[in-house]
Amino acid sequence: MTKKMPPEFYTMLEEIQANDFVILELNLYLNTHPNDYAAIQQFNEASLKSMEMKIEFEKQFGPLMNYGKSFSGYPWNWKDTPWPWQV
Amino acid sequence: MWYYEKKLQYPVKVRECNPRLAKFLIEQYGGADGELAAALRYLNQRYTIPDKVIGLLNDIGTEEFAHLEMIATMVYKLTKDATPEQLKAAGLGENFVNHDRALFYSNAAGNPFTATYIQAKGDPIADLYEDIAAEEKARATYQWIIDMSDDPDINDSLKFLREREIVHSLRFREAVEILKEDRNTKKFF
């Protein structure tokens, strides 16, 4: 059931995964180091970058998130494959 | 409340169909120190842990579900094209007659997941020490699976997960220090 996607799908997705990992790692770090100003700046910068990258990705490949965190195309395309275990 | 994002935390690639490796990986799916146990353990502890470390348990617990999805993806990809004969040869014959290729929350030996894998002591230090131990045990398990695996693509994803256990352990150790510090500054007479 593995759906063949164009190469841009994989490169854009990997860039998003890499940037989101930076955010997650800073998030956990800041939970125990709440006064690290430089880390908070990095967190906010990476978060803004994440939003911008996802807008571009979603224009080409449909919504990344459910329940109103992404906009839908017509027809409804949230339920479209591939799901993460299918790529 | 949680939102789903249609992506894995880290890519999972599989070189070839390999049900034997899938059988080992199930340890991290429904085993005592696996990702399901980890997610349920931390999210359950949130309610009674001191406020200063709730956020950490919330976020690490959430990340564990992303790891559970990565393990599931590995198992799914390693077994989806396997014939019944291949599954039987890999020691998954008993699993196949009960579940076909569906994933089942069990450990590598086939024992079903149980809530007894998760302690809930209500003592913050006891709970956090359990969490540190769980991370170290999971790190060791990942190392042993990597030692048994000859799939370089799977090993790349497993090394990512092994490193996450190390970071989680470090964060839990910091949480212990935060609580100790907090305890020492509070004076009751």
Image (cartoon, helix red, strand yellow):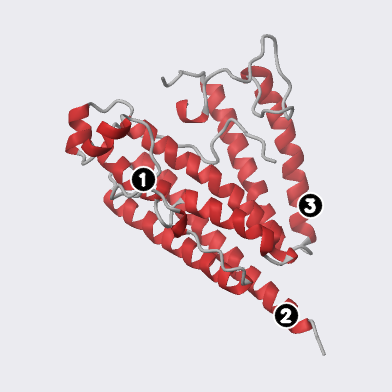
Q: Bin the neighbour count of mark 2 within 10 Å (Cα to Cα): few under 14, some 14-19, many 20 and up.
A: few
Q: Residue furthest top?
A: A75
Whole-percent x, y for residue B91 in the image = 21, 41
Amino acid at circle 2: Arg
The chain to which mark 3 is attached is A
Occupied quadrant, residue B175 = bottom right
Lateral position of residue B2 relative to residue B85, left or right: right
Which residue lies under the disc numbered 1? B26
> B154 left or right of B131?
left
Q: Which mark is residue A18?
A: none
Badge 1 local density, few (<14 within 10 Å), some, or many (20+)? many
Can I make out residue B15 in this image? no
Dot 3 falls on a residue whose secondary structure is: helix
Q: CA distance from mark 3 to mark 2?
A: 30 Å
Q: Which residue is more in the foreground, B101 or B24?
A: B101
Disc on the earlier residue, 2 or 1: 1
> In the drawing, what numbered circle is on residue A41?
3
The quadrant where residue B177 appears: bottom right
Q: Is residue B27 above or below residue B8?
A: below
Q: Which residue corresponds to the image point at 69% horizontal and 73% vertical from the top-left?
A: B178
Q: CA distance from mark 1 to mark 3?
A: 39 Å
Residue behind mark 2: B183
Q: Position of residue A2 (x, y in %)?
A: 42, 21
Alpha carbons under labels 2 and 1: distance apart: 40 Å
